[in-house]
């Protein structure tokens, strides 16, 4: 960890135009099974505000986790739309956009039918807007930067463990068959994707080689442990700085998905958007258009990510940026394992250093937009919910588990 920790640049003498973007969401379950949700986003560029909003009601007919995922992606989509407003209506160029959250995680959403009846094909629209956003930022020379305050990411830890595993394999390889060496190298990925199969495979190796694989067993146990990079940074780093930027790879399941989308996007659309296709008048046109958009997902740029600690007493931030904005040309489909990234992240670090406001204010721009966009309980219950009830001509009664309130 200490060998992969770098000092921060000096505060900049010039700060480019900075836009801060954040979103907010809320939903309420009502008697009869319906759900009302509100998603909104705000982009702040100096005194200029660019807003987007969506409120709707639907019957989920599925588990709560899928409902939360759907509403979460709706909020992220609102953030994309707010940024596009800044770029197209505001005319931003050669600036920096700070988006609250991870850019990488948004690329890994599963494109499939959604839970809301009138939004079954929404994930096609989501990725269409995401692709348009990345292309527009690149054309305008704008840096799109995702900043996460709390992150459970472990990409640094995964890379370090791969180094340790390679060193251990080098130590014992003369006593292993070539096939077993290859099998051991595959184990870390198999543990994450198919844990039971990996455990059985390693058990057979232990039976064959015995104590020779004791240290390897410890390494693989560590691979399975859930420990974020931020914990490692707090334990082993004692000064402000940032970690070696890495181009993030894809685990085996996501690699398979990218190959499917690249090889036959139409077949993927037929399998995963069957409900959306059956709900439109011209299903063939919908599937053709969806396949065209889905085929663009593997071509989206790889993501470069790193952690930054702006004060030794503070908690780290995770930072994401598309590799294409750092001069890289690799696409999502090309991503294998995590690896060191090319490109200079100094302009991003300078903005983060300039915007740091101390332990209570990790970034002055993002803190401000967070305060403005946040959806309070009273706003949802006494503004948006009754307004939506009147618009839809519905009587909305909260579930008993929420509280006894009725909006005529």
Image (spheres, helix red, strand yellow):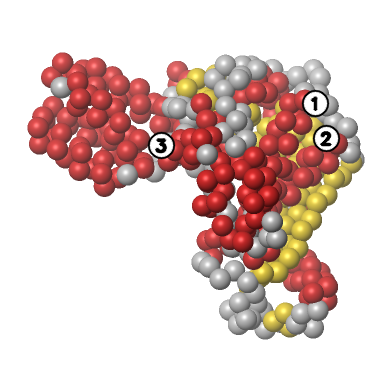
Mark number for residue 118? none
Please give the residue where the numbered disc 3 appears in the rendered image: 252
The alpha-carbon separation of the residues under discs 2 and 3 comes to 35 Å
- Compared to 108, does 119 lie above or below? below
Cα distance between the residues tagged 3 and 1: 34 Å
Q: Measured from the top left, where is residue 203 in percent x and y?
A: 16, 40
Q: Which residue was labeled with disc 1?
A: 140
x then y, percent, for residue 322:
63, 28
Tell me the CA gap for discs 1 and 2: 8 Å
Q: Quadrant of residue 145?
A: top right
Evaluate whether residue 30 shows in this view.
yes
| Residue 87 numbered tag | 2
Q: Earlier in the sequence, mark 3 or mark 1?
A: 1
Q: Secondary structure at mark 2?
A: helix
Contact between marks 1 and 2 (CB within 8 A): the answer is yes
Q: Is residue 302 something one can see in this rendering?
A: no
- The mark lying in front, picked from 2 and 3, is 3
Asked whether 255 or 408 is in front, the reply is: 255
Give me the residue at 68% from left, 64% from top: 118
Which of marks 3 and 2 precedes in the sequence?
2
């Amino acid at each position: 960890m200490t060998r992969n920790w770098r000092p921060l640049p000096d505060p900049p003498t010039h700060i480019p135009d900075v836009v801060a973007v954040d979103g907010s969401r809320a939903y309420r379950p009502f008697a009869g099974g319906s759900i009302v949700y509100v998603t909104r986003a705000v982009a702040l560029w100096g005194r200029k505000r660019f807003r987007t909003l969506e409120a709707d009601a639907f019957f989920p007919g599925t588990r709560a986790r899928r409902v939360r995922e759907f509403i979460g992606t709706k909020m992220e989509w609102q953030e994309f739309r707010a940024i596009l407003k800044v770029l197209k209506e505001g005319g931003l160029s050669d600036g920096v956009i700070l988006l609250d959250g991870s850019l990488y995680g948004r690329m890994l959403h599963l494109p499939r039918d959604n839970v809301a009846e009138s939004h079954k094909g929404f994930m096609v629209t989501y990725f269409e807007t995401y692709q348009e956003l990345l292309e527009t930022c690149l054309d305008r020379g704008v840096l799109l930067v995702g900043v996460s305050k709390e992150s459970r990411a472990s990409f640094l830890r995964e890379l370090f463990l791969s180094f340790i595993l390679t060193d251990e394999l080098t130590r014992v390889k003369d006593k292993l068959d070539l096939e077993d060496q290859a099998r051991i190298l595959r184990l870390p990925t198999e543990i994450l994707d198919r844990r039971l199969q990996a455990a059985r495979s390693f058990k057979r190796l232990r039976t064959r080689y015995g104590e020779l694989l004791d240290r390897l067993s410890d390494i693989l146990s560590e691979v399975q442990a859930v420990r974020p990079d931020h914990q490692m940074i707090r334990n082993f780093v004692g000064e402000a700085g940032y970690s070696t930027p890495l181009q993030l790879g894809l685990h085996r399941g996501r690699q398979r998905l990218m190959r499917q989308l690249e090889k036959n996007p139409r077949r993927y659309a037929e399998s995963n958007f069957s409900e959306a296709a059956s709900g439109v008048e011209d299903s063939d046109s919908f599937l053709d258009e969806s396949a065209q958009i889905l085929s663009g997902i593997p071509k989206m740029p790889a993501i470069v990510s790193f952690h930054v600690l702006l004060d030794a007493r503070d908690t780290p931030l995770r930072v994401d940026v598309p590799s294409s904005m750092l001069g890289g040309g690799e696409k999502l489909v090309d991503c294998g394992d995590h690896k060191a990234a090319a490109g200079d992240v100094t302009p991003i670090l300078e903005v983060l250093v300039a915007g740091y406001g101390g332990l209570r204010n990790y970034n002055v721009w993002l803190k401000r937009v967070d305060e403005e966009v946040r959806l309070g309980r009273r706003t949802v219950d006494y503004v948006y919910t009754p307004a939506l009830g009147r618009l839809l001509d519905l009587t909305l009664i909260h579930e008993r588990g929420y509280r006894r309130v009725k909006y005529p």
